[in-house]
Image (spheres, coloured by chain):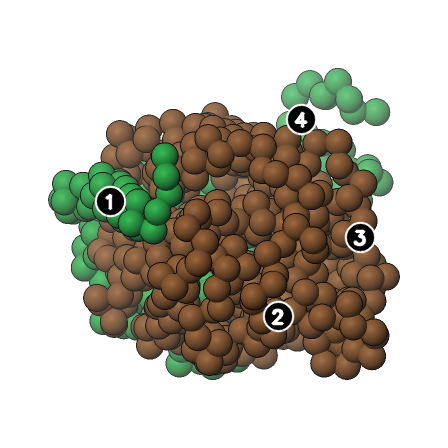
Amino acid sequence: MSNEVTESISSDNPTAKAFTLTSAFWFAAATSLGMIGAGYLIAPDFMANIEYIHFGRVRPMHINAVLFGFVTPGLLAAAFYYFPRLLRTELFSQKLGVFSAIFWNITVAAGIIGISIGHTQGREYAELPWIVDIMVVICFALVVFNILMTIRQRKESILFVSIWYTTAAVVLTSITYCLGNVIWKPDTGALLGIPDAIVLWFYGHNIFGLLLTPMGLAVAYYVLPIATRSPLYSHTLSLLGFWSLIIVYTHIGTHHLLQVPVPTWLKTISIVDSVAMVIPVMIVLINLWYTVKGKLGDIHADIGAKFVFTGTIYYFFVNIQGSMMALPHVQRITHFNNWVVGHAHIGVLGFAGVTALGGLYFILPRITGKPLYSKFLADVQYWLVLIGITGFALVLTTVGLIQGNAWYNGETLYRTLPEIQPYYILRASLGTLIMIGAYIGLYNVIRSLYFNRGASI
Amino acid sequence: MRMTPTVIIVGILALLAAITLTVVYWPYATRDITPSEIFRERSSIENTGRKIYLQNGCVYCHSQSIRSIDWGHGAERIAQSGDYIADEPIALGSQRTGVDLSQEGGEHPDDWHIAHFINPRYTRPSSIMPPFQWLAMERIETLTRYIQGLGLKDADRRMERQIYWKQEAIKAYEAGPEQNAKWLSEIVPEGWRNIPNPYPTTDASLHRGQKIYQNFCIGCHGPIGDGMGPAQPWIYPPPLNFTILKDRGISGGILYYQIMNGITGSAMPYFKRDLESQKIWEVGDYVAVYFINQSDANTEPRGIDAAWEP
């Protein structure tokens, strides 16, 4: 850690620890919920007639647990570690940080239990009932306040790229969350008719574009240069990548609605910008990959950096795929089927989730002052998640092509169901690997945080 | 460019404001709220049913948006923005793990839906929808009202047809097997009634017919064709007991027509979209051979034998 400026900053960081534990816990919980959903797809009478976990409820529970329980807190844990380091100051308030982590868990739990007992607004990615929406906004506001105040008291005048991205992510998401959940209409949390779909997908895509992506990239920008002891390749590319991401990503939500009666000019904007996503993505990847060029050995040696670097490769895949999927001709086949489910898993788990795990493993030794409880278990988790998500990508893409082509050929949905069942079985098997990985990770995190007898670094 | 906190905060907020104005507010401000020709307001029970639909995540598997390319699903009516003007939230859906429902109203009579909610495999053996028996009868019936209104005015027209023919089907059933068989024959257009199944019965055709029967028919008509499938307790008139049809003049053409077109009013759906011609002839012959024990396959008038016939 010789490159880091550590001399004046306390290594005790209860906020980062609290968010680390939050993320590891919800990863295990969310994958368990996902497994229940996968079970229903194979055998719909499995756990039949249990109201609280039937497929229509367990699916949004899984998604909300992943987004707001696992990935966002995981990326925040790293942020609460690198903000003080990069700004050469203490975190504005550890008490506020720990409180926000606790409140975050209460919020996610309230949302999940709410959906489970039927309190949902029935809008994909915006299910949470109004009261929980308010709690989510408070969560983000607490984080925004803490990091802005930390920036204010900084002793380092230059702001590193990771600071830009994470600040933008939490500030903008506080706003888009309110917009997307139509928070000024507590009853339905929705607009009337087609505009509701437009605002929903503007927000829905920005959960990825303005929250998970910038925070994931922030972790990559922080971890990769330190792990390889290399300066960042280019400041200019960092700037271009940052501003082009904010501009381009926010335009593309309507590509979810290309086959729906929304204004054609809006569809055109979303298609053009979806293709243009190649620009912010490749700028950032060129910047990061050139930074670590020739130093893959260092990345391999650091389990945190290994996860993060893998995340950047998935970032490449998910975005090339995303640009392609926004083309209307491609979407005739890919829309409405498992291809999209595969795409979502590649993005949220393959890129953002894997990067969040990398952030956790990178900071754990640094916030506990001891080596990781088990590097072996972390490696096992790495391979389980990697095999799981790569398999997911292959299987779900295959199923999507089967479904999409059959429908486009004029076959009815019922005819395709028996064909795709074997793939649902494969998918659940691969999900089992990911879930086992999540539980191994949770065990490793708990041991590293609280029951680690290893010598101090 | 020097990235100070002010540059970052002011920059991102200005961009977000400008972009939100363009891609969210502008489409909202210029939205078209003209009702489409099928639009009508939902009744209060339909609205209650819609709440049950949203609460239970039906929207994650069922889209409500027929596209121009959905010709397999029967793009009789492609979605228009005027169909959705009363929907808050809109429930377009993003996945078709199950079928699109935007024109579902009146596709089936109520009892078909009730049996389907109790266990979807009762009426659709290859369905992967989980059972909704736990909703209990009151909510299942409310939800059914919503489903039967999907398609709005188009759905109302289909429902009128369902209700009229349900009365007729009940009358025929209650008049006894003889009358029922007669009614089932007479509702088929004259030309079809005199057509025997043009293809010979073979081991292979019976096996194929059995496979189709298991995937599409067994839930109502039961494994031995006596109409005692698991859906039977929920459906009235009950599923047809094929064994009563012997010596009652049921031709291959009648079986074909009824499978193809369904019997509107009864729970018997049409299968013309799910099954191609050969599959319909073969499942018809399977029923004739095994359950009616009387098949006219490959009898006169038979035309020229198809090239593949042995």
Q: Residue at x 32, y 31 (%)?
A: A269
Q: Give the residue at mark 4.
A: B302
- Where residue A176 sits: x, y (%)? 32, 55
Side of B286 where B48 appears, left or right: left
Q: Amino acid at mark 4?
A: Arg
Q: Are marks 4 and 3 on the same chain?
A: no
Q: Which subunit holds the residue at mark 1?
A: B
Q: Residue at x 19, y 55 (%)?
A: B40
* Label disc, if present, on residue A383 of the rendered structure: 3
Q: Which chain is green?
A: B
Q: Residues within 10 Å of mark 4 (few under 14, many from 20)?
A: few
Q: Nearer the viewer, residue A419 or A184?
A: A184
Side of A275 where B251 appears, left or right: right
SS type, badge 3: helix
Q: Are marks 3 and 2 in contact (CB under 8 Å)?
A: no
Q: Is residue A71 visible?
A: no
Q: Is residue A412 visible?
A: yes
Q: Give the residue at mark 2.
A: A11
Q: Give the residue at mark 1.
A: B14
Q: Quadrant of residue A313?
A: top right
Q: Colour of chain A?
A: brown
- First of labels 1, 4 by sequence position: 1
Of badges 4 and 3, the one in the foreground is 3
Q: Amino acid at mark 3?
A: Trp
- First of labels 3, 2 by sequence position: 2
Q: Amino acid at mark 2?
A: Ser
Return the residue found at the far front.
A7
Distance (Cα) linking label 4 and label 2: 90 Å
